[in-house]
Amino acid sequence: MTCPKCNKAAQAEWLFCPFCQNPLKEKCPECGEMEWIGRIVCKSLVDEARTKQVEYLKQGTPDLFEKTVLPMIVLSAAMILFGAYVSEYHKVAWITKTTAEIITVVGGLIGCASIPAGLLTEAKFGVRSEAKKRQKFLQKFPEYAEILEKAKSAEAESSDE
């Protein structure tokens, strides 16, 4: 940040510019905290909105690993165990030993293929689902949407300077 009067660098904890004595902070009417004069949006409200958004994004949604990879690993383990049991004890009348060995091998292949497939799925679709959840959050909580939009524009303006 810079002092709006003398344009010299100012530190975040300063209330007044040490060079020209110009006030740098004022009491925020929304939260009562001392914030930079000329700010676009209350920092406390932005922090609250971001915290609520993170909580919303985390709640009740299993990640794609739980939805895709884990069921495939369980399926492959079941196939391997079933095939091994049948090929060892041959207690299922309609399955030959060769068929049981094929089931075991296919189960192993499914298990091996499910991990990279799950990682690719996570990389491809995880970003999309995250963006959709962010959009739902903004629709569900329009008051936070406005705060976050103002904060985003304020950050863009400060990075342009």
Image (cartoon, grey):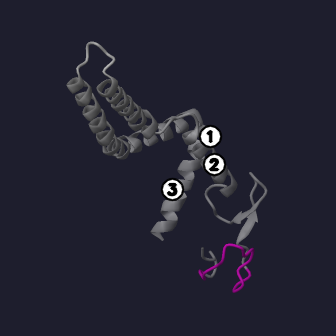
**Pointers 3 and 2 in contact (CB under 8 A)?**
no
| Magenta stretch encompasses residue 29 | no
Q: How many marks?
A: 3
The local crowd at label 3, few if under 14, some if 14 to 19, many if 20 or more residues have their Cα within 10 Å, is few
Residue hosting label 1: 143
CB-based contact (under 8 Å), mark 1 and mark 3: no
The secondary structure that most of the magenta stretch takes on is loop
Relative depth, front residue between 138 and 110: 110
Residue 51 tag number: 2
- At label 3, which amino acid type do we have? Ser
Q: Amino acid at mark 1?
A: Glu
- Say above or below: 16 vs 122: below
| Numbered mark located on residue 155 in the image | none
Front residue (pair 123, 143):
123
Instruction: Find residue 93 and report its horizontal and vertical position in percent.
Output: 28, 13
What is the magenta range?
7-21
As measured in the structure, the alpha-carbon distance from the residue carrying label 1 to the one carrying label 3 is 16 Å
Mark 1 lies on a secondary structure that is: helix
Question: What residue sits 63% from the left and 61% below the top?
Answer: 39
Identity of the residue drawn at 40% across and 42% down? 126
**What mark, if any, has residue 153 been given in the picture?**
3
Amino acid type, callout 2: Thr
- In the depicted structure, whether residue 79 falls above or below residue 56: above
Could you tell me which residue is drawn at 60 percent across and 76 percent down? 2
Left or right for 30, reference 72? right
Which circle's residue, 1 or 2, is located before the other in the chain?
2
Front one among 126 and 88: 88
Horizontal arrangement in the rendering, residue 114 relative to residue 44 (left or right): left
Find residue 90 and report its image quarter: top left
Report, in whole angstroms, how far the alpha carbon at label 1 lies from the one at label 2. Answer: 14 Å
- The mark that comes first in sequence, 3 or 2, is 2
